Image: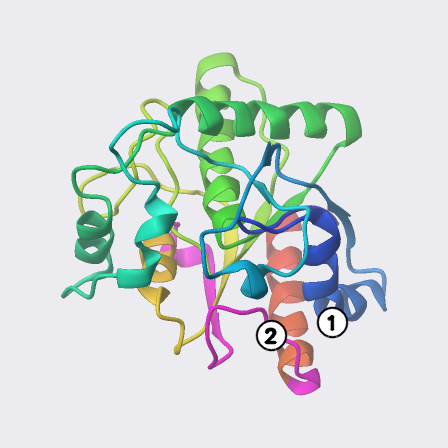
Amino acid sequence: MKFLCLPGAYGSADKFQVQLAPLVNELTSDGSAIFRFVDAPCEAVPPEGFEDFFGKPPYYRFIEPDEKETGDTDVLSRIRDFPECDTAEDTMRELMKEGVASSVISTNRAIQYLFDIMDKEGPFEGIIGYSEGATVASTFLLAEQKRFEETGRKPQIKCAIFFAGWPPLDPSNYSMVLSDESDLMINIHTCHIIGSLDPYVAGSMALYNTCEPDTAYIFDHGKGHTLPREKGVIKELGDVIRNMMAEASA
């Protein structure tokens, strides 16, 4: 199965390949999967104080504010004070309350960018996203579903793997999709890799809640907003993903 791999904000294809190397090695060892890593289309500068966390440049993002000079805030600048509410959906609503900068232009561009890659290099049966990449991947899946409903063109992607993601955006209006206020649902097989110590785990759970529950796997590696690397954890995760791929291909 061929996967398109989307890095997190301020990452790059090369950095994501290093981060995901243990899982890539596990799934390529028996020919289960092959991987295509891509940079996000927007060059970016990390928030002040986070330069060491994201490593050396180059830095890229899929989603950026439409207008840089407004008084509205980039949603990623709010992660220092991530809210805690009763439900995952309430947490995301609080995060996205008034004053968040619009990102319609870059989101639309990111989705078209992925469609172009898939048309040129596909077919891809799977998609992987980490953090912002997971949000974009899930948004892309809804865009594929929307295109199928409008044109009859069958989606390529059969399954998705999300690491520490946030919920998708509605491809019709680019508002955040939350399961308690929207009927939109990702209807393919999904695997959600979360860390119970991730300060942003509510975002991962809100993403999980937007997916078809009968075909959504969840895997907790027990750490933070990171990708798992321990040998035993990777072996267990690899088996979960192989099961998902087999079901998705049946």
Residue at horizontal 54 percent and vertical 69 percent from the top? 226
Label 1: how many Cα within 10 Å (few below 14, some 14–19, many 20+): some
Residue 74 seen by the camera? yes
> Which type of secondary structure does the marked residue at label 1 adopt?
helix
Is residue 223 one of those drawn in magenta?
yes
Please report contact status of discs 1 and 2: CB closer than 8 Å, yes or no: yes
Residue at horizontal 32 percent and vertical 29 percent from the top? 102
> Which type of secondary structure does the marked residue at label 2 adopt?
loop
Q: Amino acid at mark 2?
A: Pro
In the rendered structure, which disc, 1 or 2, sits on the residue that comes first in sequence?
1
Quadrant in which residue 104 is drawn? top left
Q: Name the residue nearer the viewer: 93 or 52.
A: 52
Model colouring: rainbow
Q: Which residue is mark 2?
A: 228
Q: Name the residue nearer the viewer: 219 or 91.
A: 91
Q: Is residue 40 left or right of residue 225?
A: right
The percent position of residue 125, horizontal first and vertical second, equals 68, 42
Report the magenta residues as a range: 210-232
Q: Above or below — where is 192 with respect to 238? A: above
Residue extending furthest toward the bottom: 232
Disc number for residue 97: none
Q: Name the residue nearer the viewer: 212 or 21.
A: 21
Q: Above or below — where is 145 with respect to 16? A: above
The percent position of residue 107, horizontal first and vertical second, equals 46, 29
The percent position of residue 70, horizontal first and vertical second, equals 29, 27
Q: Above or below — where is 213 with respect to 38? A: below
CA gap, disc 1 and disc 2: 8 Å
Residue at horizontal 61 percent and vertical 50 percent from the top? 7
Q: Is residue 242 left or right of residue 9?
A: right
Q: Which residue is mark 1?
A: 22
Is residue 126 one of those drawn in magenta?
no
Residue 250 seen by the camera? no
